[in-house]
Amino acid sequence: MADQALAESNTYNAAEDLIGRNLAAGRGDKTAFIDASGAHTFGDVERGTNRFAHVLGTMGLSREARVLLVLDDTVDFPICFLGAMKAGVVSVPANTRSTARDYAYIAADCRAEAIIVSEALLSVVLEEITPADRPRIVVSGADAHGHALLAELLAVEPEEFKTVATTRDDMCFWLYTSGTTGGPKGVVHLHSHLIDTADLYARPVLGINETDIVYSAAKLFFAYGLGNALTFPMAVGATAVLLDEPPVPNVVVDLLRREQVTIFYGVPTLYGMILAGDDLPGPGEHAIRLCVSAGEALPPDLLRRWRERTGTDILDGIGTTEMLHIFISNRLGEVHPGTTGRAVDGYELRLLDDENNEVGPGEIGVLEVSGPTSGLMYWNQRAKTKDTFRGPWTRTGDKYTRDENGIFTYCGRNDDMLKVGGIYVSPFEVEAALVSHEAVLEAAVVGQLDQDELVKPKAFVVLNQGVEASEATAAMLRDFVKNDLAAYKYPRWIEFLEDLPKTATGKIQRFKLRDDG
């Protein structure tokens, strides 16, 4: 009896928690998600997740089996993601902008027994998965194209389901990294991690509550978007708006107005693109009370212009797939432009030099973080796991400085740093200087060898509309940077581009610029 009582006290299921707390609070009829098909209540989500848990059982998936989710941002994502948790099945959301080769790799690597895929993505997902190796396919959409249709499967299953008795330390879901340092790596996360991100970051830093209406430009399959648009609103009973199309500026601005969004989560690239247009509502013309940025460091000039145009702050922060969400952040009333802010309570940080010694204030070091949301491992990649997950510490690969007040400033990725004349130069610092010029929309800086085979900064610049891409413009920008930064940091070469190469999260792919340069 004592053993049974102990087992029951350790029982915890993330889906049961996120849904059940809203039903217990009387929010069953409150809107949880708004997508292209309309509003969906917390009660709808409960019934949908229960039905999907039954679907997995009917398909023969047992506890800890993996189901690959290649889903656009519609209500089917939370239904499948949370429904799998209720069944004790591990869901593996995948990037909806991946290649056919990536889908085939991830499906094989996680040993997916089923793939739930949006109709528009079906042909790409199946392109390189041979019929003999193909898991069971379920299609979210109007036409299953010869496979099973999700809506039809859900319609015949019961609305009640007894949640599998998982624990806080059970495997819950995997997220694959974008693969910027090699092939995609599956980060294993536990049931406790979702609510921990809400309790440590969303509640105390954002002050999110049930009256909020949130929109995240980052999609649900990203760690950033998953917290923004699923975990955080469900943790407090807020409403999330889902967009199943690319977050282009005019569409996003229209959504912000139409849905009266109160918390907007974006990335620096999108904020810059929105500011370049004329549609952004000003103070008194919108309901936004708070904006958040992650993915890339936020240039201070962009923050300044956003404040002037909207009257709202952007809280810059950093999180990783390995840590699930943001663990360094600025705060309302404590925004330090050009910095990432300070540690989120509940996380410890340290900066290490090349010999793994902690560096002092003002010195550049590689960031490591310790906290309760750290991934368990990279699935099936022992060597890379040991290199990143170092006991209680998780190595991020980001370079930072910290001042005497515990404020962290981003200096670039470990492999992005430039050593010019024996002195480290952060490409982000040079980029921020360039972007502060009114002629520049975006900029990326990499290292290039000069005639003496010494590294010097080279800038790739996207100009604002109407600005001529000429040597005179390049000379003007070089002089501008010289006046803003130490002389050795200015870009020796400036190349003008129509667009910068980016990942699906909006991060600049500097390695492509280095290769092309």
Image (spheres, rainbow, N blue to C red):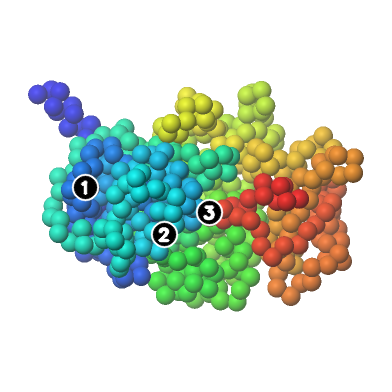
Task: Give the CA separation, mark 1 to mark 2.
Answer: 22 Å
User: Residue 395 or 157: which is nearer the viewer?
Assistant: 157
Mark earlier in primary sequence (2, 3): 2
Task: Give the CA separation, mark 2 to mark 3.
Answer: 23 Å
Check disc 3 and give the amino acid type: Thr
Q: Which mark is residue 123?
A: 2
Does residue 390 sit above or below 362 in this rendering? above
SS of the residue at dot 2?
A: helix
Residue that mark 3 sits on: 505
SS of the residue at dot 1?
A: loop
User: Residue 217 or 107: which is nearer the viewer?
Assistant: 107
Give the image location of residue 163, x and y in percent.
Answer: 18, 43
Q: Residue at x 72, y 47 (%)?
A: 514
408 to the left or right of 226: right
Residue that mark 1 sits on: 59
Q: Residues within 10 Å of mark 2 (few under 14, many from 20)?
A: few
Q: Residue at x 36, y 39 (%)?
A: 111
Check disc 1 and give the amino acid type: Met
Give the image location of residue 77, x and y in percent.
Answer: 33, 56
User: Residue 95 or 317: which is nearer the viewer?
Assistant: 95
Q: Which mark is residue 99?
A: none
Q: Residues within 10 Å of mark 1 (few under 14, many from 20)?
A: few
